[in-house]
Image: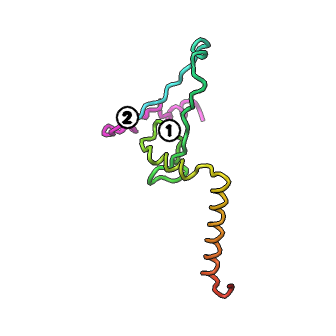
């Protein structure tokens, strides 16, 4: 193809203005990149806990469209606390109790599914 033919199909510069929803309640702003100088780096509090990231599965979207969001951005603190409580690390006694309950549950399911096995 000649350059003239290629130029004929050139769509021009990218313009994503058509994607912006004028009626949207919230405006999504781009994150800014901050560079820290050595003097500012010494002033940073390294003992402060960093903002955690959570993988968020959005309603009506597939798991492929899940995104990583900062904890401070998530507007449902009760969901975050439910997640932490559900996924907390268990001590040795709690883990043993949970395993025993799990084994009893499996035994009951086996008995329900195969009553002749008793």
Q: How is the image coloured?
A: rainbow
- Picture quarter containing residue 113? bottom right
Question: Who's the residue at 53% across and 43% down the image?
Answer: 67
Residue sitting at the far front: 93
First reached walking from the N terminus: tag 1 or tag 2: 2
**Residue 16, how many percent across, how many down?**
43, 35
Would you call the spot at circle 1 few (<14 residues within 10 Å), some (14-19), or many (20 or more)?
A: some
Would you call the spot at circle 2 few (<14 residues within 10 Å), some (14-19), or many (20 or more)?
A: few
- Picture quarter containing residue 76? top left
Placement of 15 over or under 56, stated as above or below:
above
Placement of 30 over or under 44, stated as above or below:
below
Question: Who's the residue at 37% across and 34% down the image?
Answer: 27
- Residue under circle 2? 27
In the drawing, does residue 28 fall left or right of residue 53?
Answer: left
Q: CA distance from mark 1 to mark 2?
A: 19 Å
From the image, give the main secondary structure of the stretch colored magenta.
loop
Question: Who's the residue at 49% across and 29% down the image?
Answer: 31
Secondary structure state at the residue bearing disc 1:
loop
Which mark is nearer the camera, 1 or 2? 1
Query: Which quadrant, please, contains the C terminus?
Result: bottom right
Placement of 111 over or under 27, stated as above or below:
below
Q: Toward the viewer: 99 or 72?
A: 99
Placement of 84 over or under 16, stated as above or below:
below
**Residue 41, how many percent across, how many down?**
60, 17
Q: Which mark is residue 56?
A: none
Q: Toward the viewer: 55 or 87?
A: 87
Q: Is residue 110 magenta?
A: no
In the drawing, does residue 88 fall left or right of residue 31?
Answer: right
Q: Which mark is residue 71?
A: 1
Magenta range: 1-27
Secondary structure state at the residue bearing disc 2:
loop
Question: Who's the residue at 32% across and 39% down the image?
Answer: 25
């Amino acid at each position: 193809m000649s350059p003239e033919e290629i130029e004929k199909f050139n769509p021009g510069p990218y313009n994503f203005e058509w994607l912006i929803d004028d009626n949207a309640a919230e405006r999504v702003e781009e994150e800014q990149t901050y560079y820290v100088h050595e003097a500012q780096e010494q002033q940073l509090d390294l003992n402060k806990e960093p903002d955690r990231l959570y993988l968020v599965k959005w309603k009506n979207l597939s798991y492929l469209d899940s995104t990583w969001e900062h904890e401070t951005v998530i507007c449902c603190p009760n969901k975050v606390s439910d997640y932490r409580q559900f996924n907390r690390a268990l001590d040795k006694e709690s883990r043993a109790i949970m395993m025993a309950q799990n084994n009893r549950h499996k035994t009951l399911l086996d008995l329900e599914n195969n009553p002749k096995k008793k």
